[in-house]
Amino acid sequence: MNSPGGYVYVLYGEDTFDRDEAVRTLKDRMRALPAGDHNLSELGPETTVATLRMSADVVPFLAERRMVIVRGFLGRLAGRGATARRATRTRKTVESAPDEFQTLLDYLPDLPQSTSLVFVEDDRLNTEALQKAIPRGRAAIREYPRVLDVAGWVRNRAKLIGVDVDEAAVRELASLGGADLRRLDSELHKLGDYAAGRTVTRADVREMVVGREVATWTLLDGLAERRADKALSALHALYAQGEPPEALLGRDIAPHYRRLMVARELSLAGRRERAEVDVASLGLNPATVRRWSDQAAAFDRSELEQALDVLLELDRHIKLGETEPEPALEVAVLRLCTRLAPSPSR
């Protein structure tokens, strides 16, 4: 932000929590400047180079700087992510869309001095071409790899947010949360409020976290069984426990349908093919594959695709402030508990 020229950030990797923390810091710095909110723009993966350029070339409003944040755009060029799959049902690489990618590379050296351009990506990224295109001293390219030492991350995060957690609680929380850092951060904040200044213990973790685990599984089972009464009852219980709808959507419900999709595809594969698949790398617990396969058998592929589209659209509306999250998620749950038909565009 202190560079005299236009600055390009490329923040990417599987650790989306710490990456988003970095993005939030950049946005906070921008908003702290005069007319900061008026000079902050966000674009999604569907954007084009022309649209990106129009936004980045705008003269700052009553200020010296503006910031443009672009999410998932580089991934779309590489043919990754839900947006890319909807745009084209064939697998692409950056090389297969050379004109658009090259247009972006040609533009980056001409980025106005008053603009900070931030690319945000969920996955690993080959940044070699970007590094060559961006002038020296005007780029911050950082990968956020998957966190392997989850317990260590919990300890460090607890210190950072001022929550005292004993070692047994650290290990318990790490084992319950897996690699979902966003969930672990949420649990740490809730445990800190619950402990009210004292040290958080393993018993606290079991009382506060395990109870929500039961309600979450009840919600997911209700969705899999298409039982709206069961799913909504669990959803209301989670609301009462302080669970925000945005977290339930991104952390639990959307991954639930992705796992069902994976389990369904695995069930259609031959025995030899299934034996060669590392199901853990696909987000499934090898011990529970049969359970997921049994639930997935009740769904057509088109239903699962439509369910993911419903959730993606809801996520977009919530992030853009176009709907009230709690009632909107309830409506989505009701819809997911019906037989979904594929959209006309499919």
Image: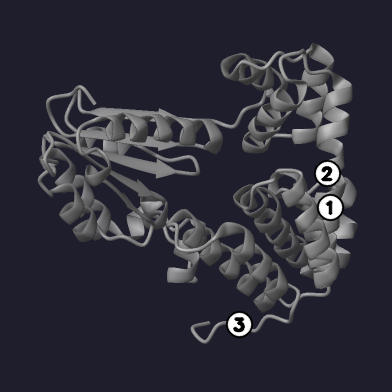
Front in this rendered view, residue 318 or 130: 318
Mark 2 to mark 3: distance in Å? 32 Å
Q: Nearer the viewer's eye, disc 2 or disc 3?
A: 2
Read off the residue under disc 2.
213
Callout 2, which amino acid?
A: Glu
Callout 1, which amino acid?
A: Trp
Residue 140, x across and y down, in percent: 31, 28
Apparent side of residue 57 relative to residue 203 in the rendered image (left or right): left
Read off the residue under disc 1.
217
Read off the residue under disc 3.
342
Q: Earlier in the sequence, mark 1 or mark 3?
A: 1
Query: Would you call the spot at circle 2 few (<14 residues within 10 Å), some (14-19), or many (20 or more)?
Result: some
Cβ–Cβ under 8 Å for marks 1 and 2: yes
Apparent side of residue 299 relative to residue 318 in the rendered image (left or right): right
Apparent side of residue 239 relative to residue 93 in the rendered image (left or right): right
Residue 201, x across and y down, in percent: 83, 18
Q: Can residue 223 be seen here?
A: yes
Q: Earlier in the sequence, mark 2 or mark 3?
A: 2
Q: Quadrant of residue 342?
A: bottom right
Front in this rendered view, residue 67 or 276: 67
